[in-house]
Amino acid sequence: MKTINKKINAGILAFLLLISSGCEDFLDRYPDNALTAEQLFSDIEYAQTTITALYDLLSETYLLGRNVPLRGSLKGADFFHFVENPDKRFDREYKYAEISSSAGYAGYLWNYCYKTIANCNSIVSIIPELDGTTEFKNNMLAQAMTIKAISYLELLRAFSYPPWMAEDDELYSMGVPLLKNASDHSNAIENPPGRKSLGNCYDYVIELLEESLLLIDNNTDKQFLTKQAIQGILANVYLYNEEWQLALDAAINAESLGGNMIGKSQFINNMTQRFNSEAVFEIYYDLNDNPGTSCIAYYAVKSVNSQGRIDANSVGYGDYGASNTFINLFVPEDIRNELFKEDKTSSSSTQPGEPGYSARAYHKYMGIESALVHEVAYLRLPEIILVAAEAYSELANDVKALEYLNKVYVARTGITLTGITGQDLKNEIFNERRRELALEGHELYDYLRKGKSFTRDFSHPSPLTIDPVSGRNDELFHKVVYPIPQPEMDANPNLRDAQNPGYAPYQGGL
C-alpha cells in the first residue's frame, strides 16, 4: 500500500498535505477540493498515486490504524485498562466519561473521516476526464467510492445508534452529514450540512458499495479493496440493518471469491503473517511507515521473551488486559488460548496458574518485522463466515447456521459443535464473534445492534452495565455513541440542535 507511493510531484505533495492537515476550523473540515483537482492530476499515473494516498489516510492511527478497532473493544466488557494512562489514551471512552467539550478521540475520528470523504469526492470528480482505459478508471472510482463508504460506516458506528433503535424511537434516528460530491463541499462553505436520517445514510453507503461492485476489477491484492472485500463490507451493512437474506447473499458471494480458514495446528505461526489465507482487506505497514508507539500492539501488550516473560527488552505499554468474562469464553482446546501472555502485573511466578503469574495480555496484534510492525485486519474470512452464520440463524435455518459457525469453531478448537438450535445457537454465534473478532472493533456495536445488555465483571476497574433495551435512561447509556464534538457545533450552526440524546445541548462557543 504505502510502499508503492513513491513518485510524488509538487501537485501530489500538495494533495497529501491537504488530506493530512489539521481541523482548526470549518473550512478545513469540509474543504473545497474540487477547485484544485485538475491541478493535482496531471495524468492517470499520478491519479493512481492519489488513490494510494487515500489508503494511507485510512491507515492513520486516528482511523483504522488504531482508534477504530480499540474504541469498539474498550467500551465493551471484554477488555479493560490495567492502570489509568498518563496521557489519557482512551481513558474517557473506557470510563464512559465523554462530554461534548471533552470527548476523547471523537473529534479526530470525525475530522479524519470527513477529510477522507472530501478527497474521495475530489478524486471521483476528475477521474472520468483523465486519459486511460475505462477499466482502469472504473477500478479507481470503485476504490475511492468504497473508501468513502468505509468512512461513512465508521462515522455511523461511532456517532449514531443501530438502525433497529431508530425504528424503535425517533430520538435515535439521526445519522451524519452527507457530502456526496465535490460540489457539496463547495456549497458547505455557505450552507453547512446538517445530519441526515440514519436510513438515508445507510442507503447511501449501500449505493456506494453496490456501484463499486459493478466497477471494480478482478484484482486480488489484499492490501487494496477487491470485489471480495466490497461484498464482505456490504454483507456487514445489510447485517446491521437486519436485512438477513441480503446479508446472507452478500456473505456467501464474498466467501466464494477465495480464502481458507487456517487450521488449528498452523494458526499461531500463520495468524500474524501478512496476507494469510484468511485475510480479505488488511491495513498494511512496513518498517518505514508503521505507527510506532501508536500501533495497537504497543498500547495493548508488552512483548515477551522466549520463556514467555516480560524482561528489560520488552516493548509496549501493555495498558489493556482481558477480563475474566472474556478469558472464560474459551474452552481448553481452543488454540486462541495461546494468545494470552504474561501481562505487566505479573510478579514472581514463571508458570501460568501459579500465584504471581498473570496472563491477561492478548497478543492478537504482534510484529512481523518487529514487535511494532503488524497488520490491522479490516475484514477477514472468519468475519464473513460468521455473518452468514448469523443470517442463517435469523432466517431460522439452524442447520446451515451451525454448519457455518463450525467452519470457524472447528478451525480454532478441533471440536465440532452439535445439537445447538434456536436462541442457544444465536448466543453461540454471538460469542464466537467475541472470540474471533476481538480487538477488531466490533464488540460494543455487536451488543448494541443485537439489543444485548452487558455488565463488566469485577476484573474491571471501571464497572458498569449497558442495556440497549431497558436501560436507555441510565446515566451512562447515551455514551455508547460519541457526542458531536463541540468544535464541530461551533463551526457548523446546522449541527447545534442535533446533538446526540443524553449529551448537553449546545451552549455556545468557548
Image: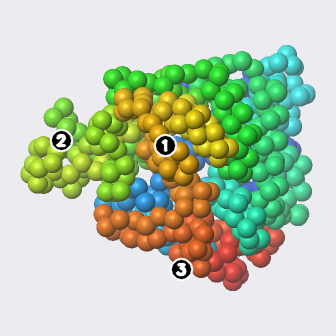
Name the residue located 49 percent from the left edge and 73 percent from the top edge: 97
Question: What residue does disc 2 label?
Answer: 309
Q: How is the image coloured?
A: rainbow
Q: Secondary structure at mark 1?
A: loop
In the rendered image, residue 156, in percent from the top left (x then y), is placed at 68, 56
Instruction: In the rendered structure, find residue 420 and report the number of the disc placed on it.
Output: 1
Q: Amino acid at mark 3?
A: Glu
Q: Is residue 135 above or below residue 171?
A: above
Badge 2 or badge 1: first in the primary sequence: 2
Mark 3 and mark 2 residues within 8 Å of each other at the beta carbon: no
Name the residue located 30 percent from the left edge and 60 percent from the top edge: 82
Picture quadrant where residue 229 is located: top right
Q: Secondary structure at mark 2?
A: loop
Mark 2 and mark 1 residues within 8 Å of each other at the beta carbon: no
Report whether 124 appears left or right of 427. right
Name, please, the residue furthest toward the bottom: 507
Residue 415 in sight here: yes
Name the residue located 31 percent from the left edge and 67 percent from the top edge: 458
Q: Nearer the viewer, residue 499 or 356?
A: 356
In the rendered image, residue 318, in percent from the top left (x then y), is placed at 31, 51
Q: Report crowding for label 3: few under 14, some 14 to 19, many 20 or more residues within 10 A (C-alpha).
A: few
User: What is the spatial separation of the Cα atoms under label 2 and label 1, in whole angstroms?
Assistant: 40 Å
Instruction: Locate the C terminus and report the quarter of the image it occupies.
Output: bottom right
Report whether 91 appears left or right of 357. right
Question: What residue does disc 3 label?
Answer: 475
In the rendered image, residue 333, in percent from the top left (x then y), is placed at 30, 35
User: What is the spatial separation of the Cα atoms under label 1 and label 3, in whole angstroms?
Assistant: 37 Å
Q: Nearer the viewer, residue 121 or 345?
A: 345
